[in-house]
Image (cartoon, helix red, strand yellow):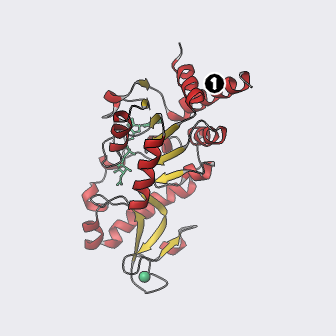
Amino acid sequence: MDLYNEVAELLVKKRSAVALTGAGVSAESGIPTFRGPGGLWTFYRPEDIATPEAFERDPEKVWRWYRMRLEKIFEAKPNPGHYALAEMERLGILNCVITQNVDELNRLAGNKCVVELHGSIRRIRCVSCGYVERLEDLSKLDNLPPKCLRCGSIMRPDVVLFGEPIPMREWTRALTETYKAEIMLIVGTSGSVYPAALLPHIAKERGSLIIEINPEETELSYIADIKIRARSGEALPEILERARRLILSTQ
Ligand code: OAD
Ligand code: ZN
């Protein structure tokens, strides 16, 4: 049987799936991934720009890098992969998206249940008082680093930097969704960053079915029961289409 049909049938039968996503899902929106050919980490070293130490040393440099990423992200739109995930949630065959992405494209596509493990690049947070502000455009970043409206201290991107823990609330939600679901879709992630990459292992241990969608082999491939070697912008709409037909045919 065709793998897309198989996955669609499982999603419709169980009505209990969660997706763990990574940079690959946004690649087709024009946002570069971190690893692999053309990935951000082939041009930059994470320890220079994505750690709390780097921010303390040179907040302006770190900010310039985030502003460059934000420019791309503000221009980006959700792609067919994001829209398929949103429609799957609407149809009741996907409970939630747990993402490592900071671009908020899942929400923009229409997903209601989104766990943002690594925060959002569209928010900034005061390093002193914790005040959080949303960025609607780049104007707040004309002078770097941006200053807190409340206390005047400097603000940082409201994202998880390397070496920082995932906020407890997000991590708890991610665990709850992982335990609740009988199927985990792992989409567009290399599975190399922890603790995010723990979630598929927890799901596996719990007896969930693991389905990987990724054009390449990853560090999580060995625990996947089904592997679809395709881009998410192609595979997810295919699966959705088949699931839709199945739902219609049983109504
Ligand atoms: P990576 O850049 O490590 O991996 C991207 C994955 O997407 C790879 O496995 C690619 O094969 C796959 N891929 C590329 N194009 C794709 C497409 N069109 N459809 C589906 N898959 C595709 O990104 P993440 O796994 O998200 O963390 O990286 C995890 C974390 O490492 C990020 O959240 C970030 C990064 O450093 C922090 O900044 C803390
Ligand atoms: Zn402040």
Residue 237 image offset from top left, x and y in percent: 60, 32
Residue 48 image offset from top left, x and y in percent: 26, 61
Q: Quadrant of ligand 1?
A: top left
Residue 123 image offset from top left, x and y in percent: 49, 67
**In the orientation shown, which residue stands out farthest toward the top?**
1
Residue 117 in sight from this viewpoint: no
Residue at coordinates 29% horizontally, 58% vertically from top-left?
162
Using a 10 Å C-alpha cutoff, classify the residue at mark 1 as few (fewer than 14 neighbours), some (14 to 19) or many (20 or more): some
Measured along the vertical axis of the image, is residue 56 above or below residue 20?
Answer: below
Residue at coordinates 51% horizontally, 34% vertically from top-left?
232
**Which of the 4 image quadrants contains residue 179?**
top left
**Which of the 4 image quadrants contains residue 12?**
top right
Numbered disc 1: secondary structure = helix
Residue 37 image offset from top left, x and y in percent: 35, 38
Q: Name the residue carrying label 1.
A: 242
Q: Nearer the viewer, residue 141 or 226?
A: 226
Tally of numbered tags: 1
Left or right of 39, for residue 76: right
Residue at coordinates 45% horizontally, 40% vertically from top-left?
24
**In the orientation shown, which residue stands out farthest toward the bottom?**
151
**Which of the 4 image quadrants contains residue 241?**
top right
Cβ of mark 1 under 8 Å from ligand 1: the answer is: no
**Which quadrant, please, contains the C terminus?**
top right
Residue 135 in sight from this viewpoint: yes
Tag 1: amino acid = Arg
Residue at coordinates 50% horizontally, 60% vertically from top-left?
71
